Image: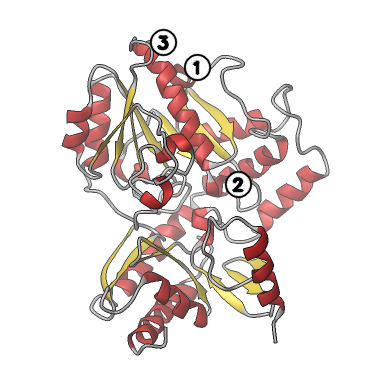
Amino acid sequence: MSTVADEIIELDDERIAHNYHPLPVVLATADGSWVTDVGGLRYFDALAGYSALNFGHRHPALIEATKAQLDRVTLTSRAFYNDQLAAFAEALVELLQIPDGMVLPMNTGAEAVESAIKVARKWGYEVKGVADGQANIVVAGGNFHGRTITIISFSEDEDARAGFGPYTPGFRTVPYGDAAAVADAIDENTVAVLLEPIQGEAGIIVPPEDYLPAIRRTCTDNNVLLIVDEIQSGLGRTGTTLAQDLSDVRADLTLLGKALGGGIVPVSAVVGSASVLGVLQPGQHGSTFGGNPLASAVGHKVVDLLATGEFQERSATLGKQLLSGLESLVGEGLVDVRGVGLWAGLDVDPNLGTGRQVCKALQEHQVLAKDTHGSTLRLAPPLVVTDEEVTWLVEQVRHALVDVKVGNF
């Protein structure tokens, strides 16, 4: 006898392109760190929408700001000014401490990355003096910046890349975490270095402490833009406003998304100095929905929440508790644990099972998580998580590993 969930899953499989492989759970409601399925079962959300839900589901302040704006105006297009965008941009550059900052508002993270690539190339031709059509950008191996054609052109993920050529030229890939390799790859036509301060999709890969500072110096010395993709790592996730704050570095262009929309609407942004973003002129780039009043109102409230420092502090403190607990499971089904703040990568012993098997076991223990690259789990609880929930989460991971070990999954 089929259930409501079975029927929904069957319809989804029939009508939705198979670009995802979801766990067999159908969610209907959510609040804070918890979600509820159509059958009434509650689960702890340990994925938080790949960091889009840093403030949890339906944060009261964000819901209030959304409802207030819904009663006023939601979309005007950038053909006209609206009364929300400029204030949002001003608050954002203040949060990021960029005195001469400008904001290029977009919608999704991939749009922000594509926009930054365009800006960097235009800056290279008009400011640096690179010959037309010769610009190159240095990127890091193992990266994940999205799945558009240009972005997958410099991806090493064959699932994302294979079968989608021809690929966009103009990118040079070097090993992640190797600042010397970045320096060696730069030539007179290099306009930018694009990287993640911590690689998320790759499994929460944390580079050496001197990695980002060394690349910042190299970029400055060679008149090359540093573009840092903080779409997953930014806005409180690592215990600081930006992951680059951990290294006391500021990029020329910082890319934001996911949490900037509060888990309510898609909001992304390229943030940098006027000397870089100022190369754009009317008609050269755009977005119908980018910078719309509703998105701006929600984004502004997200900035307000971060301006107090509360969420950064929670992430730093509870992150230490989470990582300490998870590290105790190394040798009990895990072979390595990495992370910063409330962001952890767990490598499952391949002799035990796969990451997806552990995720299915976790689902039985009321925890929803996501595997990556076969044997790695990513945990990114909402920043509203409590210390009791963190302790409970670690215990559920322990139980799930035992379940997989005894062959239940």
Residue wearing tag 2? 261
385, above or below 137, in the image: below
Specify few, some or many for label 2: CA neighbours under 10 Å numbering under 14, 14-19, or 20 or more: many
What's the distance in space between the residues labelled 2 and 1, CA to CA? Answer: 25 Å
For disc 3, the marked residue is: 126
Task: Check whether the beta carbons of the residues at disc 3 and disc 1 lie within 8 A of each other.
Answer: no
Task: Inspect the image, locate mark 2, and give the three-letter code of the amino acid beneath it.
Answer: Gly
The tally of labels here is 3
Mark 1, residue position: 278
If you read the primary sequence from the N terminus, does the residue marked by circle 2 or circle 1 appear first?
A: 2
Which of marks 1 and 3 precedes in the sequence? Answer: 3
Residue 176, percent from left and from top: 25, 44
Query: At 24% across and 20% down in the image, what residue appears?
Result: 222
Characterize the local packing of mark 3: few (<14), some (14-19) or many (20 or more) Cα atoms within 10 angstroms: few
x 48%, y 32%: residue: 114
Tell which of 11 and 65 is nearer to you: 11
Residue type at numbered disc 3: Glu
Q: Kindly give the residue lying farthest to the right in the view shown.
A: 71
